[in-house]
Image (tube, helix red, strand yellow):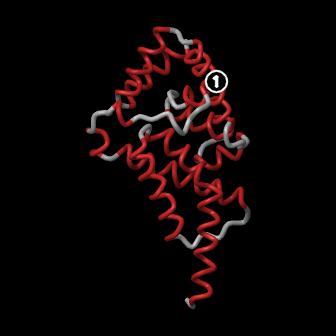
């Protein structure tokens, strides 16, 4: 590869980075919930992009690829034994990236609802596009959006019992989270 084509690839990557940094950061923050891990996941996402030979058909394709990559990286980190055994340090949590009250509440949703709600309402993807990105059926995404809105409404209404359930959901593993989802849905 000669110097000119290297420079061209670097410029292209820099443009992609500048265009998508905020979106990738928000997606990672919704999963990781702390600044340090979010920044690591964002870096890993763009490193994955640099190492790939991906040619994007459009800016939407580029954005969808980065969102899917960020989501997969975050899920891998969350599955790792190191992350599961680390206690949550409340001092690491920051709300500086999320100034919208609703978006702050969205991060409290269980992961499968959070992803669908965020991609639909904040990134503007259709149910079909979200289904393709996360590898599920369109009807599943529609159901997750409906349930996510219902849970989000309860969170936003500030029911005192809901606050306690959110804490339990955030501090437990997926099995306990499923029980809490049923409580929210009732």
Classify 75 as above or below 89: below
| 2 relative position to 47: left or right | right
Identify residue for label 1. 149
> In what element is the residue under mark 1?
helix
Q: Position of residue 17 (x, y in %)?
A: 59, 61
The quadrant in which residue 27 appears is top right
Classify 135 as above or below 176: below
Q: Quadrant of the C terminus?
A: top right
- How many numbered tags mark residues here? 1
Q: Position of residue 63 (x, y in %)?
A: 65, 55
Residue at left 71%, top 56%? 60
Q: Quadrant of the N terminus?
A: bottom right
Residue at left 55%, top 18%? 155
| 164 relative position to 127: left or right | left
Classify 37 as above or below 54: above
Q: Position of residue 33 (x, y in %)?
A: 44, 37
Q: Residue furthest bottom?
A: 2
């Amino acid at each position: 590869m000669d110097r000119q084509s290297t420079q061209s690839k670097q410029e292209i990557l820099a443009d992609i980075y500048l265009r998508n940094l905020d979106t990738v950061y928000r997606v990672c923050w919704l999963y990781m919930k702390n600044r340090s891990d979010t920044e690591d996941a964002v870096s890993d996402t763009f490193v994955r992009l640099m190492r790939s030979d991906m040619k994007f058909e459009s800016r939407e394709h580029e954005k969808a690829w980065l969102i899917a990559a960020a989501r997969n990286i975050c899920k891998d980190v969350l599955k790792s034994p190191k992350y599961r055994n680390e206690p949550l340090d409340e001092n690491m949590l920051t709300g500086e990236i999320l100034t919208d009250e609703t978006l702050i509440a969205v991060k409290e949703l269980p992961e499968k609802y959070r992803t669908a709600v965020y991609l639909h309402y904040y990134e503007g993807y259709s149910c079909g596009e979200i289904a393709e990105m996360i590898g599920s059926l369109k009807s599943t995404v529609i159901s997750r959006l409906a349930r996510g809105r219902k849970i989000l409404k309860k969170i936003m209404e500030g029911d005192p019992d809901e606050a306690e359930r959110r804490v339990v959901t955030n501090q437990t593993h997926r099995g306990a989270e499923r029980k809490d989802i049923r409580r929210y849905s009732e």
